Amino acid sequence: MRKAIRNLTAGHPMPYRGRTYSLEIRKTLDKPQVKIDGDRLTVNFYKEHPEVPVQVPLVKWYRRKSQHYIISRTAYWSEEMGLSFNKIFIKDQDSRWGSCSSLRNLNFNWRIIMAPDEVIDYLLIHELAHLKEMNHSTAFWKLVAQYDPEYKLHRQWLKDNGKAIFLLLPKLPVSLLDSIFFHVD
Ligand SMILES: [Zn+2]
């Protein structure tokens, strides 16, 4: 049996890059779409698919936005730090924010896009630093501090707010995510 998906209703606060938007749901016959509109995060959603929860278009939108932002921002920090990576994967993990593999691949959880920009930067710097220091040694933290002097604050932010972010949009079954076509611009 599938775990019940908590219903997100209109007016729910939705974080995105450090700002909070109010969720607006519009049932429409037009092309489904998610967009930021002033202080609202508006979901134009299929009228004829009442069984598909609003989380589906939201997850797709956040994930796409995250992919664009993380890829360009990681390129920036990679250059700044003089550390090159192989590939970036944007993942839908249950609790991890990021990781770095011995193949020099970087993995990031798409949900990080809900955090403020400086916290996103901290995560990117943290994983890039692992390309040089594959541990959490003093040398590792020194390298992180060189590019993010306030890393302790940013790390704490993730500890304090991470759980709420994971609870807001938990991992959805792939079958559900694939159940509708959804255009993300
Ligand atoms: Zn680490």
Image (cartoon, rainbow, N blue to C red):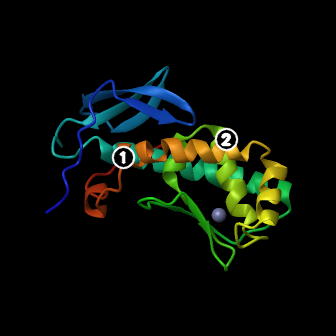
Q: Residues within 10 Å of mark 2 (few under 14, many from 20)?
A: some
The amino acid pointed to by label 2 is Leu
Q: Amino acid at mark 1?
A: Leu
Task: Return the residue found at the far top.
Answer: 38
Q: Residue at x 86, y 62 (%)?
A: 82
**Disc 1 residue crowd, few under 14, some 14–19, many 20+, Cα 10 Å:** few
Q: Is residue 96 left or right of residue 101?
A: left
Rounded to the nearest whole Å, what is the CA distance between mark 1 and mark 2?
22 Å
Q: Residue furthest front?
A: 138
Residue 167 is labelled as 1
Q: Is residue 154 above or below residue 101?
A: above
Residue 78 in the image, given as x and y percentages of width and height: 78, 59
Quick one: SS at disc 2? helix
Can see residue 107?
no
Q: Does any portion of residue 43 appear in the rendered image?
A: yes
For ligand 1, the image quadrant comes to: bottom right
Identify which residue, 19 or 66, lies in the foreground.
19
| Residue 65 picture location, percent across and down | 53, 45
Q: Quadrant of residue 149?
A: top right
Q: Report x, y in % for residue 150.
A: 75, 42
Residue hosting label 2: 153
What residue appears at the point 75 percent right and 67 percent down from the top-left corner? Answer: 137
Residue 79 appears left or right of 65: right
Residue 29: image quadrant is top left
Q: Who is closer to the viewer here, 124 or 90?
A: 124
Q: Position of residue 141 (x, y in %)?
A: 77, 58
Of the image marks 1 and 2, the number of the one nearer the N terminus:
2
Foreground of the two, 167 or 84: 167
Is the C-beta separation of discs 1 and 2 under 8 Å?
no
- Secondary structure at numbered mark 1: helix
Q: Which quadrant, please, contains the N terminus?
A: bottom left
